[in-house]
Amino acid sequence: MHDDEIHPGSITLTEAAALPEDADWTGPTIRYDLVKEVTVAVVVVAMLAMVLALFFGSPDDAPVTIRQWSNAKPGDFLATALSELDGSSGSAGYGPPYNTAGTGQELGPVSAQQIVGVHIPLDTVNDFILAPLRQQAASTPAVGVVLAQWSAASSDQQTTWMTNYGDALPKGNQTGTGAFSVPPADDGPLPGLLSALLTLADSGALDADLTSSPNFYGTDYTKPLLFLSDSGYLADKGKAQNLSGSQWGMMNETGSYPGQAWLWLYTMWYQIPPMKTSHNADVEVWAIMMGFSLLLVFVPFIPGLRDIPRFVPVYRLVWQDHYRRLAAERVTPPAGSPPD
């Protein structure tokens, strides 16, 4: 409307309420500039958000990188690399969408991950270990020698080497930043192989190799994140920031506790049996929250539940001015208006 003043209508609010829904409004009108209201709202909210972000914004913690991990905990890096090589890591046996090594989480007889299938292929042996080393071998002949020795061995021989190296690894010692000494064992080329990978990680080149992309921008961090998630280093970092599952990690944020408290309804289910200890916790919690979401969608069609607003008249607080005017009209109708 573009009227400068409020104009009295020809009918009262009580009479207007009794009209059909498609009847033309002939009651009072008031000037309202929608464009101005939207502009003011956007500008004010944007400025307020920027000012508040300076004081209350999420902390800008530096990202955890493979280089940082290998420098700080080279023993953990080597142990994780060995688990990627022998197929015992979490990523190697995860299942869809990365591989077919596992069935994934199940909801009753249904495996949600198998329905989606493998659409982000991941081969931990090749992607995390061998492919980066092949690139390094182009400029470092010694790496090519141990790679050739490893590739020429039978699977049984490789298993023996990995077993012997895994037994010797806990007896090793960190000898400096990004350096780790493993006692000699009958482990073939494996020490040279993993030592070369550690050198690659210490230089930061492994981070670049795992984020390489056919696109111009390398923004796919799936592989480095999965490699890091298989380590004990990232788990320790998360616990220090109150981000583990037992610490309500889904709603926490780095540097802030408890963090996004509005997520409590979702993360609460992870603290309740059987989800607390279930291997299928993610899909079970998803199913519970989907049930609540569908319930919310179908509220208008559920007798009793849809009538709650009538029994709990919060709407009268929201529209209190309207009901105050309506009550006043019933007591003293405007001059010239027909009686109720």
Image (spheres, rainbow, N blue to C red):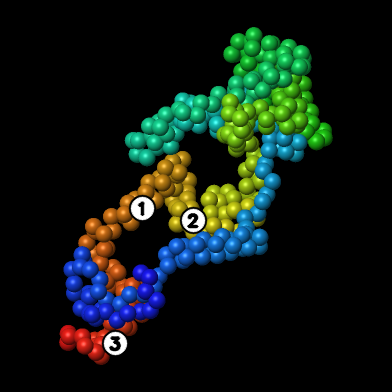
Which residue, given by chain and number where applicable, does mark 3 sit on?
328
> Residue at point 46% right, 66% down?
37
For disc 2, the neighbor class at 10 Å (few under 14, some 14 to 19, many from 20) is few
Which residue, given by chain and number where applicable, does mark 1 sit on?
293
Q: Nearer the viewer, mark 3 or mark 1?
A: 3
Among the 4 quarters of the image, the one containing residue 117: top left
For disc 3, the neighbor class at 10 Å (few under 14, some 14 to 19, many from 20) is few
Determine contact: label 2, label 3, CB under 8 Å: no
Position of the C terminus by quadrant: bottom left
Which residue, given by chain and number where applicable, does mark 2 sit on?
263
- Which residue is nearer to you in this view: 102 or 147? 147
* N-terminal label among 2 and 3: 2
Above or below — where is 240 with respect to 183? below
Expressed as whole percent of the image width and height from the top left, the position of residue 162 reads 65, 21
- Which residue is nearer to you in this view: 64 or 156? 64
- 15 on left or right of 122: left
